[in-house]
Image (cartoon, grey):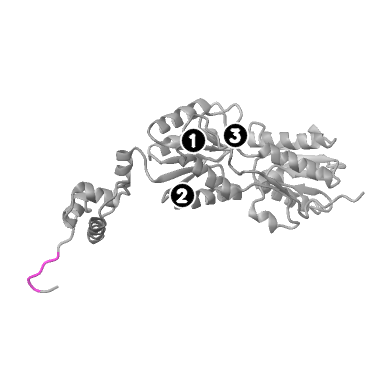
Amino acid sequence: MAEGRTQTRRSTPATLHDVAREAGVSLATASRSLNGSARKVNEEYRERVLAAAAKLGYTPNLSAQAVARGTSTTVALLVADIADPYFSSIAAGVVGAAGDDRLIVTMAETKRDAERELELVRAMRGQRPRVMILSGSRNIGDPNAAALEAELTAYEQTGGRAVFISESDLPFRTLPLANRAGARDLGVELHALGYRRFAALTGPETLRTAHDRIAGFSEGLASSGANLPDDRLVRSAFTRDGGYDGMRRLLEAGIGDTQVVFALNDVMAMGAMSAIRDAGLEPGRDLAVAGFDDIPTVRDVTPRLTSVRMPLERIGEQALRLALDDAADAASARAASADVSTEVVIRESTPRVEA
């Protein structure tokens, strides 16, 4: 260090006042330049403010901004299982759409636990996110529904927007999914391939997605003159291990003349195929298997899995668009025009039955 010169260090973080003073502008101009205000700032002033902020190492206080605005630039996304490709695909769509609007996504996992979901919503309210998206299936007869409605109502009263992905009875924006219709189409397609004797692996009876999918599948079979016997319906966890356990129980009870097993989501279907192999049988040859969602990994398993394709990333995108749509501000607003239609994709796991 040169003789006679001293080096000073800032012991406290730079404030917005410091930036305004360094740039030679008013506090209001400095704030608008740094905080994304809708009010236009003179470009010369804005550049001076940005240069001053960089020189001083100023970082905006996002929490304070959220308090001042009543909301922030974040999107809170609640998923049931972060490791499930169904939810990670939806999350990818939300993140992509959020980037277009310069929003940041934070994510939390409910573990399909309604009480945990309620606790997370309460915690996230304190962060004042601009949008809160709840992507997990609703539980029929959920005792926490009234408390969840109260939390989300209070959240929206402070300027936030809540959106449900999948069917919900609560009075908030909802992006309905074609679970029932997609499963109905699958039942019809499997019957057309020559299958006549069916079994199914489903989730908990109170899980609305499971309820809608099994109801739709039964409707599709009935329309073709077939049925799903009660003793061929096995309930287990809505996970890969749940699919394995359900298939193991079905095999231990004796599959009889069952030709095809419908697992209500793809991760369950992959677990089921592993159980079939462990029993010394071959999926797609000794017992056909079909899933639902068409997550990317089903194209890489052997045999490739027949599934019902849902546009998962698009669903994430459209959920955020619904939240940001000022025209959809009425209670119970639904994205009736959203393109979330399904498509049955037949692959090697359900070969045509020879007459």
Q: Could you say which is closer to the camera, residue 40 or residue 159?
A: 40
Q: Could you say which is closer to the camera, residue 87 or residue 192?
A: 192
140 relative to 311, above or below: above
The quadrant in which residue 326 appears is top left
For the view shown, which residue lies furthest in the left direction? 4
- The three-letter code of the residue at mark 3 reads Glu
Dot 2 lies on which element? helix
Q: Position of residue 34 (x, y in %)?
A: 29, 52
Q: Position of residue 306 (x, y in %)?
A: 74, 50
38 with respect to 211 (left or right): left
Q: Residue at x 53, y 42 (%)?
A: 319
- Span highlighted in magenta in the image: 3-7
Q: Which residue is mark 3?
A: 167
154 relative to 276, above or below: above
Which numbered disc, 1 or 3, marks the residue that appears first in the sequence?
Answer: 3
Q: Which residue is mark 2?
A: 98
Q: Is disc 3 in contact with disc 2, using a CB cutoff of under 8 Å?
A: no
CA distance for labels 1 and 3? 17 Å
Dot 3 lies on which element? loop
152 with respect to 266 (left or right): left
- The three-letter code of the residue at mark 2 reads Ala
Q: Residue at x 69, y 37 (%)?
A: 180
Q: Which mark is residue 328?
A: 1
From the image, state whether disc 1 or disc 2 is nearer to you.
1
Q: Position of residue 47 (x, y in %)?
A: 26, 59
160 with respect to 260 (left or right): left
Res 141 visible = yes
- The three-letter code of the residue at mark 1 reads Ala
From the image, state whether disc 1 or disc 3 is nearer to you.
1
Which numbered disc, 3 or 2, marks the residue that appears first in the sequence?
Answer: 2
53 with respect to 285 (left or right): left
